[in-house]
Image (cartoon, rainbow, N blue to C red):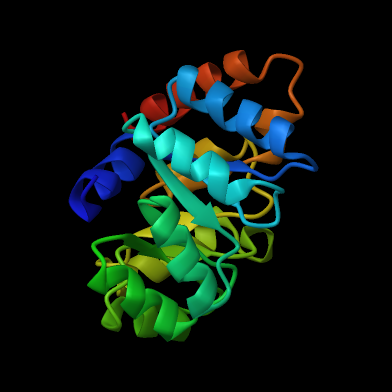
Amino acid sequence: MTADATLAAITDHGVVGIVRAATAEAGHAAARTFLDAGLAAVEVSLTTPGALETIEALTKAGSAVGAGTVRTLAQARDAHAAGATFLVSPLLDLEVVRFAVEHDLVALPGCLTPSEMATAQLAGAHLVKIFPAHLWSPSALAGMLEAMPDLRCVPTGGVSAESAPAWVRAGAAAVGVGGSLTRADDPAAAVASLLVAIRDARG
């Protein structure tokens, strides 16, 4: 899957489903549930046992599956070898961003300040992950986008199914949501409800 196709999968649906699990079995099952429930893009954190194997299995089926918590160039290379279509980081590492761009992967580095976001964008990042988003607010994002309207932001960290629509209305290109989906009594139903809420928020 090309970077353009992956980017469309993320922004068209407006959600990156985040998988972080204690076992390889739980991680694979959560990622599969998210995809089957309608999410077009799923991030599997490298802190999850067997993350690379899960990424490899799901991308072979044609899904947009990325590696999360990518902190080093070595991890970026491993994720690429496993077939990841996008790389998500908790921080801004320009080597990881450039590696993603060079290998036709979507780069989604973690940034906290407008300066970091601008630096990431100049390095070629397709999207910027506002992380942790609970240190921001939808109104702060809306204000920043008035000055920097070309940024495509993905608030992540503390974003729930309930708060996601407010971020989207503020101008987020997508949101990263994990725990509130995996902890739901019915994760598949929670995903379906979230997708409807985001469509409604976009009008």
Q: Is residue 7 left or right of residue 190?
A: left
| Residue 50 in sight | yes
Q: Is residue 44 left or right of residue 142?
A: right
In this view, 63 is above or below 135: above
In this view, 22 is above or below 117: above
Q: Is residue 1 left or right of residue 25?
A: left
Quarter of the image containing the C terminus?
top left
Q: Residue at x 51, y 76 (%)?
A: 74
In this view, 78 is above or below 72: above
In this view, 201 is above or below 130: above
Q: Residue at x 38, y 32 (%)?
A: 40
**Residue 166 point in image, percent of width and height:** 52, 42
Q: Residue furthest right?
A: 22
**Residue 34 point in image, percent of width and height:** 54, 26
Quarter of the image containing the N terminus?
top left
Q: How many marks?
A: 0
Residue 72's image quarter? bottom right
Q: Residue at x 59, y 16 (%)?
A: 188
Q: Is residue 128 left or right of residue 98?
A: right
Q: Name the residue nearer the viewer: 111 or 199.
A: 111
Q: Name the residue nearer the viewer: 69 or 157.
A: 69
Q: Name the residue nearer the viewer: 72 or 163.
A: 72
**Residue 198 point in image, percent of width and height:** 43, 31
Q: Residue at x 31, y 67 (%)?
A: 151
| Residue 142 in sight | no
**Residue 134 point in image, percent of width and height:** 68, 59
Residue 61's image quarter? top left
